[in-house]
Image (cartoon, rainbow, N blue to C red):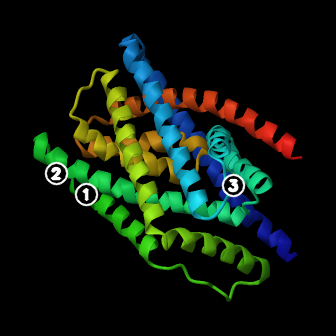
Amino acid sequence: MTPDADEQPSKKRPSILRWVLTVVAVALLAFFLWDRRDELSRAFHTSWENLALLILLNAVGQTMNATEFWMLYRAGGAPVRWLDNYSSFNAAQLGNYLPMQAGSVYRMHFHRRIDGVSFPRSLTTYAQNLVITVAAGGVVGVIGVCATAAFTGRDFSVVMALVFVAMLSGAAFFAFVPLPHARWLPGRVQHWWQDFHSGWELVRQNPRSAAAVLGVELGRMLVSAARLQIAFVVLGVHAPFVLYLVLAPVASVSTILAITPGAIGIREGAIAAAALAVNFKLPTGLLAASVDRGASLLVVIVLGLIGYGHMTSRLSKHA
């Protein structure tokens, strides 16, 4: 048997596993929502002002997240225009509901064609955004856990505190420790790594730019916490805002790291688990996360289609 034949099954296994996980996650979430459809319907009998505010906050948060990427692209020396970045970000959010992160791949292709940004340099921006998101999540989460115990009378959640401290520690490591040059890598891989490495170091050695992005991300975490609070309110659950400072970082990081398209099922499960850790009921956490997903999906579809239209127009003119 040839080496290629030996390698083929190993290449297929991660793809098959991802498909299985996606189907299972979506099926379980769909079954749960159907089983709780009476409770979920309450969200649509609540104040329309709350639902409109939830949609608005989703749009604001998405705009802030897109702006972070633009700031990182510019800090890395890429001549990316804000409108191009905003359109490509929104289109990518919609496209990522397809398999294999199709939206992000198309976005990187767009910036390579329009702005001359290589794929490794775009990956650098994604990695930097992940580290900053984890750092902001750690800060907000620690504040949320401490404030919840201090002001609500609920027990101090040791588990969530350890999670957020670990997030802060991991982000600090990648922020302050230089990446290796890895000159032992072969040919083209070495070239790609050096491209990634140079973009990473440009931002890492420019703390003012990184701090500005961190500030925007901290603001986005507060917006995310407000979104989740409204999602719980429309289900008839009222709790102090500080509790949602614990849930918001989990929602953000799980969305980035999940391997299912659009983080379907994974994000909802992560929010519900964090809600359970601060004494919410698990079903309530899942329902609230699903309500927020509905508002988010509406924003993603509308802004994503507009962004895709802008991108195709720009690519056509560039060609």
Q: Mark 1 sits on what residue?
A: 161
For the point 60% across and 58% down, the residue is: 74
Cα–Cα span, label 3 and label 2? 40 Å
Q: Nearer the viewer, residue 121 or 287?
A: 121
Residue 270 visible? The answer is no
**Mark nearer the viewer, 1 or 3:** 1
Q: Mark 2 sits on what residue?
A: 156
Residue 120, position as x, y percentages in the image = 69, 66
For the point 52% across and 54% down, the residue is: 257
Does dot 3 land on a helix, a strand or a loop? Answer: helix
Q: Nearer the viewer, residue 162 or 146?
A: 146
Does dot 2 land on a helix, a strand or a loop? Answer: loop
Q: Are marks 2 and 1 in contact (CB under 8 Å)?
A: yes
Which quadrant would residue 275 be assigned to in this image?
Answer: top left
Which quadrant would residue 309 be assigned to in this image?
Answer: top right
Q: Mark 3 sits on what residue?
A: 15
Q: Earlier in the sequence, mark 3 or mark 2?
A: 3
**Mark nearer the viewer, 3 or 2:** 2
Density class for disc 3 (Cα within 10 Å; few <14, some 14-19, many ≥20) is few
Does dot 1 land on a helix, a strand or a loop? Answer: helix
Which quadrant would residue 73 be assigned to in this image?
Answer: bottom right
Which residue sits furthest bottom? 184
Amino acid type, callout 2? Phe
